[in-house]
Image (tube, rainbow, N blue to C red):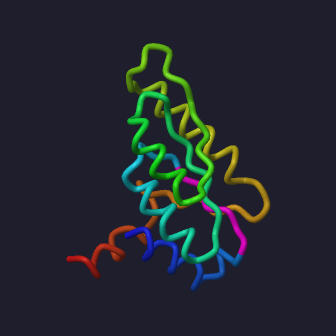
Amino acid sequence: MAYGVIKAAMNRGDLKAGDRICEYTGGSTGTSIAFVASILGFYLTAVSSSAFSAAKLQAIRSYGAQVVLVESSDGKLNPDVFQRMKDKVQEIAVSEGSFYFDQFGSPDVRPSYAAIG
């Protein structure tokens, strides 16, 4: 799915060599995006939370991605943490040369699963 969304964005011209991909993630999709981005020469800034698994966050970093953490005061996930993650990725995504992946809203997500279906 990560490859399909990135490839569609490249084909439209929304994502060009050297651009930054931005996404908020708990880790699984973020790791996939980081993997594909590293192969295709893109940068990933993943916004996540300290409430998610340290191993998942390390997996994202292992592909060269930057992880920006939104702290959870009690170490748990709640609507406020998710909203702050969304707000942070939106703040980053407006930067020049940035592309918001949008795993929960991109129209490119569903067709990208066809290859693995």
Query: Residue 50's x, y, as percent?
Result: 49, 29
In the rendered structure, does residue 84 fall within the stretch colored magenta?
no
Which residue lies most toward the bottom here?
11
Q: What secondary structure is the stretch in magenta mostly built from?
A: strand
Which residue lies most toward the left here?
117
In the rendered structure, does residue 21 fall within the stretch colored magenta?
yes
Image quadrant occupied by the N terminus: bottom left
21 or 61: which is nearer to us? 61
Image quadrant occupied by the C terminus: bottom left
58 or 12: which is nearer to us? 58
Quarter holding residue 21: bottom right
30 relative to 42, above or below: above
55 relative to 31, above or below: above
Query: Residue 107's x, y, as percent?
Result: 43, 68
Residue at x 52% of width, y 55% of height: 62
Which residue lies most toward the right here?
96
Residue at x 56% of width, y 76% of height: 9
Query: Residue 81's x, y, as percent?
Result: 48, 28
What is the magenta range? 18-23
Give the side of residue 115 with respect to residue 70, left or right: left
Query: Residue 65's x, y, as percent?
Result: 59, 55
Give the side of residue 51 with respect to residue 90, left or right: left
Quarter holding residue 79: top left
Residue at x 49% of width, y 33% of height: 49
107 or 92: which is nearer to us? 92
Residue at x 25% of width, y 77% of height: 116
Q: How many marks?
A: 0
